[in-house]
Image (cartoon, rainbow, N blue to C red):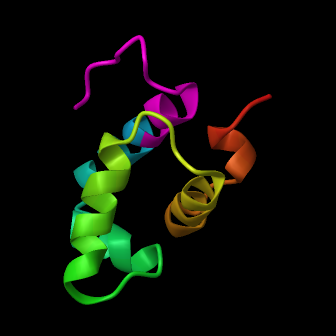
């Protein structure tokens, strides 16, 4: 999942790099999912699906940015 594919949206490349930093700091997919506003089993599952995405929805990028405490502009550049 860390390998960059030609089909990956540049925002997802940045998301995955930020996720690797959070994992190194001890975060789990469950913790990230809860920080993104999901509860229970859906937290981990939703994050797993999001991290595999190649063409994310802006609403998911906003949730992720808020959860990891970065500006959306850090992830999405025009």
Q: Establish if 54 lies above or below 71.
A: above
Examine the image and state in which quarter residue 7 appears.
top left
Q: Is residue 22 visible?
A: no
Q: Residue 75 in the image: x percent, y percent?
A: 62, 40
Residue lying furthest right in this view? 78
Highlighted range, magenta: 1-15
Q: Establish if 29 lies above or below 11.
A: below
Examine the image and state in which quarter residue 13 appears.
top left
Which of these two is toward me, 66 or 50?
50
Q: Is residue 68 visible?
A: yes
Q: Please count the marks in the image.
A: 0
Q: Is residue 33 left or right of residue 12?
A: left
Residue depicted at x 38% and y 41%? 53
Residue depicted at x 29% and y 76%? 43
Residue depicted at x 22% and y 62%? 26
Q: Residue 51 in the image: x percent, y percent?
A: 34, 47
Residue depicted at x 29% and y 54%? 49
Examine the image and state in which quarter residue 27 appears.
bottom left
Q: Is residue 48 left or right of residue 55?
A: left
Which of these two is toward me, 35 or 7?
7
Image quarter hosting the N terminus:
top left
Image quarter hosting the C terminus:
top right
Residue lying furthest bottom in this view? 40
Q: Residue 46 in the image: x percent, y percent?
A: 32, 66
Q: Is residue 2 magenta?
A: yes
Majority secondary structure of magenta residues:
loop
């Amino acid at each position: 999942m860390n390998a960059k594919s030609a089909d990956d949206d540049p925002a997802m490349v940045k998301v995955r790099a930020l996720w690797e930093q959070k994992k190194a700091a001890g975060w789990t997919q469950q913790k990230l999912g809860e920080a993104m506003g999901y509860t229970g089993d859906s937290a981990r599952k939703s994050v797993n699906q999001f991290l595999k995405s190649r063409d994310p929805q802006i609403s998911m990028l906003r949730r992720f940015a808020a959860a990891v405490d970065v500006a959306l502009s850090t992830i999405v550049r025009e």
